[in-house]
Structures are given as structure tokens and as C-alpha cells.
Image (tube, rainbow, N blue to C red):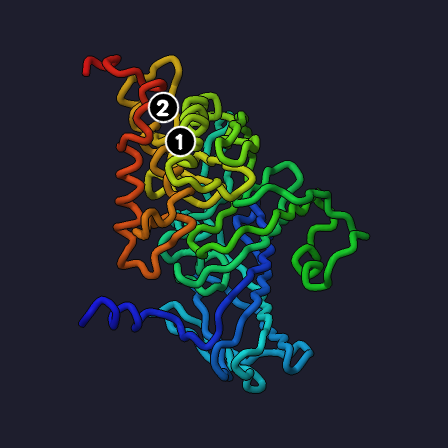
Amino acid sequence: MSLTSSADHYRLPVNVKPTHYDLTIKTDLDKLHFKGLVKVDLDVQHDTSVITFNSADLELASAFIYSDVVKEEQALTYSGFDQAQQRTTYSLPQTLPAGSKAQLKLNFSGALSGSMMGYYKSSWQDEGKTKYYALTQFEPTAARRAFPCWDEPLLKATFAITMISRQDTVNLSNMPPLSEQSLTPDMNMPSELKELVSNIQDEEWKITKFETTPPMSTYLAAYANGDFQSLTTSVVMPLSGKTLPLRIYATKDIISQAQFALEVKKAVLPLYEKVFDVEYPLPKLDTLVAHDFDVDAMENWGLITGRTNAYLLDPERSSIQAKKIIAGTQSHEIAHMCCREIERIPRFGNITTMEWWNYLYLNEAWSDCLEFGRWVKSSYQVLVPRGSDGT
């Protein structure tokens, strides 16, 4: 079987195409549980009477569709779940014609497990007590474990993410916060959001709304909630002249060891903007260091995530080898932020994304080339001086 036919077997139907996700997530770190509401704007590509999307390990509640044809919200009928393909199908009350537009609305919930996939929990020790925070890891196909979606790299859409959490926690996502306010009983909000917060009257919670992302694949969406602290700096970008805020987040037990990774980010990001001759497209770049993380790091657009041994450096006991690891990891992930086509040859990254997962090796290989290539060399030697380890 060819790669193309094999891939087609696993791809979603092409009758509709997502263009925008309006995603609200309520995180309960005490109960290690999350609830959400997603509204997905759809372009109808072919006449269709069913909608199929990806989901896994989620409890789906009510589902509704609004279209510019019917012009009223209609309930959908659940048709089934394909466990092997991780697909859920709903039947529409009437056929939507090609060329029309629709919005799917779904309520869902799930557990914050320790799987290190989807939206999951990570633990840390605070004065002998175990505490938890939550973060995402979606690549390659785990966004569907956090919210119902069209979980394929080709199907890019914009994301407007809203997070509901306890007042004393920090919310992070791909984009900067647009607003943050305490939840009050008399707050004006849509009725569907009131259902998410209906049982929190006696506790202090807040709602954080983030700016809308550029079009991107689902595997690059990211968010986190927890008791985080941060280190902050900024850099003037060479092409735009804009001052870009740079932050690194971690829990208070390890934040003091994150300064070197922040310095690497400040040195490397402007170099890549020069190399690709394209402005870094987001208004900030954060990094979150996680105690429990399955890979070294992940290039979520605007919110890089990674494990402790890939980002932390004890200033009292640091080695040149440890600095090389951190500099390499940070450089690799930042390379993903800016990659695009050069001289008609695609350099896969967050801007120019592979069509299907059989090209994932090119996505990672190109960042490897930049990580160790000449473009990082001058900055790398400032941070890790040549010959300081005897080489």
C-alpha cells in the first residue's frame, strides 16, 4: 500500500472544513477534572448530512449546529464512535449544501490524567505536599483528547481560547491575555458559559480570555493552568523593530534555575528572524518548564513547553555539557517558530506545516539543522564560550 492511500484511510472526511475554534476550558485542579465548550466555524465543502470529527477519552454532552441556511440552532443526533480511528459522528437534521457555512457547538469534559498527552496533570512538591498543575501536549494526535476537533495538520484554523480557573492560579496559552476578571454571580456572560460555572458560587474563580491566534494546526494549540512563577525579559526584533516580551514559567521550586534558558531564547530568536527574512508573527514567546513531560520539548506556537532537564540549569553546579543541552533544545524549538519556504523549498515549521504525518521527519530534521548550524553558532558561542570545555 502506498503512503498516500495509507494516509487517506486515516484522514477525516472532507465534507466540511474548520476555520475557527472558540474554545472555553474550565480547569479544576482540586478535582483533577476539566469541562469545556467548543464552537467550531465550518465551511461546507460538499453537500452533507453528517459531521465527523476526532475525539478520544472525552465525555461528549449536547451538540448543536447553526447554519446560514436554516438560520436557527438545531440539535444533532449522535451516530456513533469509532474507537480505532478516534472519530465521533453526528447526524444533521437536514442536509447542508456545499458553499454554506455552519457552526458546531459541543459541550465536553474529561479527567486530568497523568498520561502526558492531551490536557494532563503534572505534580510537584511544595513543603512536603504534592500539588498539581495542568498543561497540554498535542503532537502528533492528542488535541482530540483535550477537545473535539479536526485533528490533522493540514486543517488549520484560528483559535480563540478562554480559560476558567481558580483565582490564585495562572493561565497560559499561545497568545497574550486579552482580559482577565474575577467571576461574580452577576457577571454578564452567554448562557452556555453559565453552565460551566454553575457550581462555583462559593469559591473564588476567574476567567481569562486570550487573543485569537493566526491560522495553525491543532497540534500547535496549547494552554496551561497552575501555580506558576515567571522570569521576564524582552528583545527588539530586527525586522519589525518591535519589542517582544519573553518569559519562562515554572513552579516556585525550580524557577530560579530557568534564567539561562531565557537568555538563550533572547539570543536565538532574532537570529532566526534574520535567517528567514520573515517577522516572528506572534506578540510574545513564553516557555513553560514541566516536571512531567514525555519528550524533551514541544514547539507550541507562542508557548514552548519542555521537561526540566531540557531547560533548567543550577547556577551553583552547572556544567558546559548542561548548557549545551539547554542551548540546543531551546534553539531547536525556536527554529520551529519561524520556518517557512526558502527558495521554493519548504522548511516545515509552525508557519509552513506538513500536510500529513509522514513528513514529520522533515519538520524535525530542519530544526535540527538550524539548532546545530551556522545561524545559531555566533550566539551559541557567546552563551557557551568555545574551548571552555576543552574543545
Q: Quick check: 75 left or right of 89? A: right
User: The C terminus appears in which quarter of the rendering?
Assistant: top left
The amino acid at mark 2 is Ser
Q: Which residue is mark 2?
A: 379
The amino acid at mark 1 is Leu
Mark 1 vs 2, N-terminal side: 1
Viewer-proximal residue, 251 or 326? 326
User: The N terminus appears in which quarter of the rendering?
Assistant: bottom left
Viewer-proximal residue, 272 or 74? 272
Q: Which residue is mark 1?
A: 271
Q: Residue furthest bottom?
A: 94
> How far from the left and from the top, in percent, is residue 51?
49, 76
Any part of residue 388 in sight: yes
> How far from the left and from the top, in percent, is residue 94?
57, 86
Residue found 65% across the figure and 82% down from its top: 70
Any part of residue 62 in sight: no
109 shown above or below 64: above
Badge 2 marks a residue whose secondary structure is helix
Q: Where on the picture, by quarter, is residue 353?
A: bottom left
